[in-house]
Every structure is written in structure tokens, then in C-alpha cells.
Image: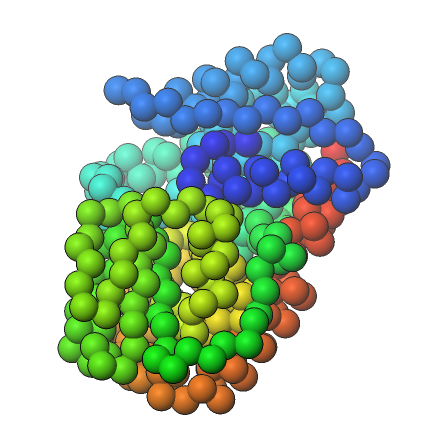
Amino acid sequence: MEQTLGNITHYLNLRRHEDASPDFTPCWLPVEFNASALPWTVTGGLAARRALKPLIDDVDGVFIHTLTLALLNADSFGRKPTVLSTDGTPMNKRSMRSDYGLRPEWRAQELGKRMLNRQVFARARGFVGWSNWAKQSFVDDYGCRAEDVAVIPPGIDVDRFVMPERNNEVPRILFVGGDFERKGGDLLLKVFRRRFLTKATLDLVTRSDVAAEPGVRVHNDVAPNSPALLKLYREADIFVLPTRADCFSLVCMEALASGLPVVTTKVGGIPDIVDDGATGHLLNVDDADALGDSLFELVTNPATRHRMGLLGRQAALARFDARQNARALFDFVGSRC
């Protein structure tokens, strides 16, 4: 299990619910990220290889999350049935490279990597994609059979999030995004200044260096799943994430579970999370006018906020419960191994 960003939360949730499937006993191998001059595909893959090698003869099957860790372990796929897991394939992520600070790939690089991945994927027994967006790429870009790809979102601990009675006289807008610009925080701040200074307040949870200003509170030291973050979800009225690049979004699921209408963008697998017009709004990237109009509807209409929030809470319970999704994941892996 790769230990980076949201993958850490996914790993911890799976460990917390490992008793959800009584049919097998997991042996967990967390692979910690270490900065290096070499690509993470190399250092992470080698670390996964070292961890797996002494156990490969004693297990019945292997589950690898993410694809980054899989490329240097393809030789083990023939020894034990293996299921690969990801929030998005390399082809999914190709258009997002610049947003993540990566250089564009030459056409030859792209074709070479796709050929290599197709060869690796052909040896796997099954695949787990976090979204239909990821599944479609497995099928269309890498020739995998649709029946071999299960769509299973990571899930969240829905019991930690509640939908309280909200009675804020001035609506509170919440943004949670470590990378402020990639997550669209700069766009949200501009729209807020222009249209909502006297109509709402804005809470920004981010690792980036952003200054507080009238109507805007900045929270730089709020950890995932922390009491401070749970409190911000309870106190908010609207959740906004106008992200420019994301494969999936745990915070959008957390907002739904907290009974908040979610305003976000149509990138990656996020359309699987938010039902446009029902549990929130899905916007085009960098559409400031649509962002402002969607927020105006929610800021000025408590009944709409409550209706969308209630539907969002119901959706989170039905589709994103970590224990239910862990059981689905374990059952799929068990069926392939």
C-alpha cells in the first residue's frame, strides 16, 4: 500500500475494517514515500519488491495499491494471482501532469509507457479503480476486460461525520485543499472577494501560505480526520473545491457525509461523487461566473442547502461507507485470488 496523500487514509481505513471479510487474513506492507533523485516509480517499486519478496511463497494472492508500486513487481504476478488498484491510470493522469508540477511527456515516452503498462496489466488477475473514469481507461487505453475491473471507491468513516442543525446567521463556506492553487483556492478567493464579502464567510484549510483577510479565516495546521477538521465540517454550510486536477476527492465525500452541498469541478473521477443538481454542483474548471452563481444560489437559499445536504448525507451512507467498501474490495480480491 503506497503511503502518499489520500492513499494513507485509504490504507488506514482498510486496516481498520480488515475484519469485514472473514475469508482471508491480510498481511499489510505499507510502502513509505522517500524523496530521491530517482522517480518514485523506481524507488517505490523497489521498496515494494523488497517488502514482498520474503512473503511471496507464503501468500495466496497479492493486492497492490498503487500502479506506481506495481511496475517493478510484474514478475511476481505469474507466481501468485495479483490485483492492482489505483485512483487513476497513467493515461488518466497525462493531462494533469503540469498541474502536479511535472513536465509534459514526449509522444514516444507516452507510447513506450503505455506499451509497458499494457504488458504489466496483461499479467494481473484483476483491477480496482476508484471511479468509472479509471475503469474506462483500463479498458480503452490498456485493453483490459471490463469484467476484470471493479469500481470501488476508497470510502470514509461515515460515523465520524454528522449532519447537525445549522443555524449560522451568515453562511459559512469551507474549502479543504493542501495545494491551494491546484485545488482552485485562488479562484474561490477571487470570487468570494468580488461577490460574497458581506454575504458569507470563508474558511480555508490548506498547507499553502495564504494570508487571512476580512471574512476569510485560514487554517494551516488542520490534519486529516482531526477533531479540528470535523468541527469545521460541522460548522460549515457549503463545501467548495474548484479543483483543477484531481483523480478523486476524499474531502468531497467527507463533505457529503457532513450534510453539506458540494460545489466542485468535473475533473477525474469526481463526477462519480457529486450528483449535479441534487447533492451539489459540478462546474467546468476555472469557470468563475458559474462558481459565483452556484455559490449565490446556496448562500441565499437555506432550504436548497438543507435539501442538497440531506441527499448528500444519504449518498455518502449508501456509496462511501468505508466498511462497506472495504468488504467489497476484500471480496473482489478474494474472488480473484
* Residue in the image at 29% along x and 72% along y: 201
Question: Is 318 placed left or right of 66 in the picture?
Answer: right
State the residue in front, 147 or 222. 222
What percent of the width, then of the height, locates residue 118?
Answer: 48, 37
**Residue 223 to residue 189: above or below:** above
State the residue in front, 143 or 79. 79
The image quadrant that residue 184 belongs to is: bottom left
Is the N terminus in the top left, top right, bottom left or bottom right quadrant?
A: top right
**Residue 96 to residue 200: above or below:** above
The image quadrant that residue 161 belongs to is: bottom right
| Colouring rule applied to residues | rainbow
Instruction: Report whether residue 317 is seen.
Output: yes
**Residue 13 to residue 243: above or below:** above
* Residue in the image at 73% along x and 21% along y: 59
Is the C terminus in the top left, top right, bottom left or bottom right quadrant?
A: top right
State the residue in front, 246 or 318. 318
What percent of the width, then of the height, locates residue 35?
Answer: 32, 23
State the residue in front, 193 or 134. 193
* Residue in the image at 32% along x and 63% along y: 203
Question: Is 52 placed left or right of 254 in the picture?
Answer: right
